[in-house]
Image (tube, grey):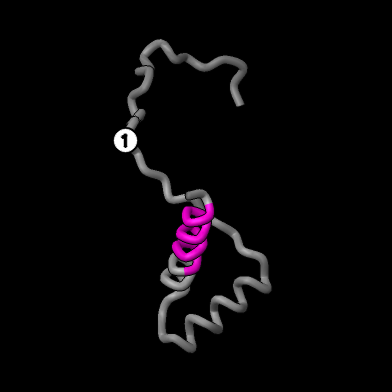
Amino acid sequence: MRKEYDFSKGVRGKFYNPNARLNLPIYLDDDVTEFIAKYAKRKKLDTQTVVNQILRQSKEMAQALES
């Protein structure tokens, strides 16, 4: 690594995109992963669909409790 770098030709914010949407990885505990994988296989669905269904149900329940 150099002691100094020349940023005189750099452009501030060149790659900045305020509308960028990030899909962050979510890591599940082993027991949850195993349950979801078995459930998804039994229902012939992919794991992402199962996780989204579970989260939507939890979201709806939380919203119902708030009102």
Q: Residue furthest bottom?
A: 42
Q: Position of residue 15 (x, y in %)?
A: 35, 30
Q: Quadrant of residue 10?
A: top left
Reply above or below: 44 against 51: below
Disc 1: CA contacts within 10 A as few (<14), some (14-19) or many (>=20): few
State left or right for residue 19 relative to residue 6: left
Q: Quadrant of residue 33?
A: bottom right
Return the residue at label 1: 19
Q: Position of residue 30 (x, y in %)?
A: 67, 70
Q: Residue at x 57, y 15 (%)?
A: 4
Q: Residue at x 35, y 18 (%)?
A: 11
State left or right for residue 8 relative to residue 19: right
Q: Which stretch appears magenta? A: 54-65
Reply above or below: 1 against 7: below
Q: Position of residue 23 (x, y in %)?
A: 43, 50
Q: Main secondary structure of the magenta part?
A: helix
